[in-house]
Amino acid sequence: MLEILANSLPQLAEGLKTTIGLTVLSLILGTILGIFLAVIRIYGKFPLPYLIIFYERVFRGIPLIVIFFLFYFGLSLQIGLNIDPFTAAIFGLGLRGAAYQAQIFRSAINSIPEGQMVAARSLGMSKLSAIRNIILPQMLRLSVPGWSNEFTIVLKDTSIAFSIGVIELMRQGRYIYVNNPDYVLPVFLFIALIYFIMVISANKTLSYLEKKYKMSGFEIGVER
Amino acid sequence: MHMLEVKDIHKSYGDLEVLKGISFSMNKGETAVIIGTSGTGKSTLLRCINQLHPPDKGEIWLDGVNITDPKIDINKIRQKIGFVFQEFNLFNHLTALRNVSIGLEKVKGFTKEKAEKKAIEELKRVGLKDQAKQYPAQLSGGQKQRVGIARALAMDPTIILFDEPTSALDPELIGDVLDVMKSLAHKVAMLVVTHEMGFARNVADEIIFMEGGVIVESGPPKQMFQNPKKARTKEFLGRISTLYGKD
């Protein structure tokens, strides 16, 4: 059994690479878009906030696998956009992630005391400059706990990209057990362990960053 | 020509008319103190002046410019109007130094080095050079407020508006803040909402008594404290002197 696991290591490493690529790229897309959505939802002019609420409702209301199928089998194959499964998965995870992350960033912005914006404006900063220089840096620090939760969800949900044929960790696992049907359990236990270790180490790293970049002595609510 | 002219300012929030026609003027370098009970529109008036809450009616002129004109670039005007808040409103993620320098850098376009050099000077002026690297949460209330004053001063404003700058402070910390404010008198114009009668009596050139959204009476401290014309002024000053002490 150990031999089979050892022999399959290169294959699993290949899958792991794809899993990490999916996670990183879709998180980048989701975070950047999520920040824009949150800022526009709070500070944007009518009707933009309503469009964003609609966007959030849609992407939070559909299972990820359905989003994947819509993007890949629908948009790519039937409509003919010709995007490969990997790209479809990044967009699926990224656009859905943006909807969830917008919530994280929005609640972070809402927990920043109103006086911060007022003080920035009274110095003569434009609204945009105040958002960029005062609101966003505080928002990012306050978002770390929520964001690390989202990080682990995205990391685990990359496994659903299996369903549209992305050759990631899960799919590689399937290749292995198809050739060694007696070892389904150990193979997937091993894969579970890999996910588990990645999630735990990501959480540890993020909580380290959270401590390092926390506003010195600043805790939410203390100022009010 | 007056430096600041406030002409017939009205402001309502919904059905509630908070300011019902406020007019007064100030000269360059003058200190005016606004007194009055809570809820009479003193803070609203300050926020109307720097257009955080634009007035519904009336005009405000600063250095010969009508700043209530909707065509005016309000961000330009606000650089000339410092604001010091009751709750300090220091930027929580920035050190004392950066709190003071960020406006210079992002609004006035100073380089980072030049902005921080000036910020150090301003912190020195309020006696907080040694606290430059500390974050707001590490400062006492009085220190925070002095950073707030340095932040306003750094922009070289024509006038600084103070919205109850000592109301959120422990009594023993109030003195430091008032001393800094005193040291600014006649260097920069100050319009101060406060209950500190000692400060009003000793530093103000003009005292404005507001009630119910209008100015009941105004005049130099001597006249206001010794010979108020209106019975209501006398009553208010009598009551507040018992509360906060004669000096």
Image (tube, coloured by chain):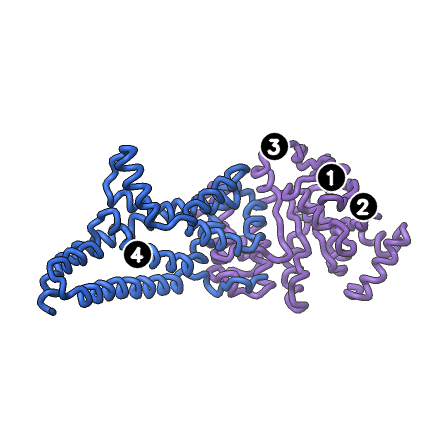
Chain colours: A blue, B purple
Q: Is residue A29 above or below residue B173?
A: above
| CB under 8 Å between discs 3 and 1 | no
Chain that bears disc 1: B
- Image spot of residue B209 (x, y percent): 80, 51
**Could you say which disc has been placed on residue B156 in the image?**
none
Chain that bears disc 2: B
Q: CA distance from mark 3 to mark 4?
A: 51 Å
Relative placement, left or right, of B125 versus A177 is: right
Residue with the mark numbered 1: B6
| Mark closest to the chain's N terminus, 2 or 3 | 3
| Mark closest to the chain's N terminus, 2 or 1 | 1
Residue with the mark numbered 2: B214
Q: Amino acid at mark 1?
A: Val
Residue with the mark numbered 4: A155
Q: CA distance from mark 1 to mark 4?
A: 60 Å
| Rendered residue at 68%/51% (across/down) | B185
User: Which element carries disc 3, helix, strand or loop?
Assistant: loop
* Mark in front: 3 vs 4: 4
Q: CA distance from mark 3 to mark 1?
A: 17 Å
* Mark in front: 1 vs 4: 4
Asked if marks 1 and 4 fall on the same chain, the answer is no
| CB under 8 Å between discs 1 and 4 | no
Extreme-front residue of the structure: A181
| Rendered residue at 59%/41% (across/down) | B78
> Considering depth in this image, is A42 or B3 the residue closer to the camera?
A42
| Rendered residue at 42%/58% (across/down) | A146
Residue with the mark numbered 3: B72
Callout 2: few (<14), some (14-19), or many (20+) C-alpha neighbours within 10 Å?
A: many
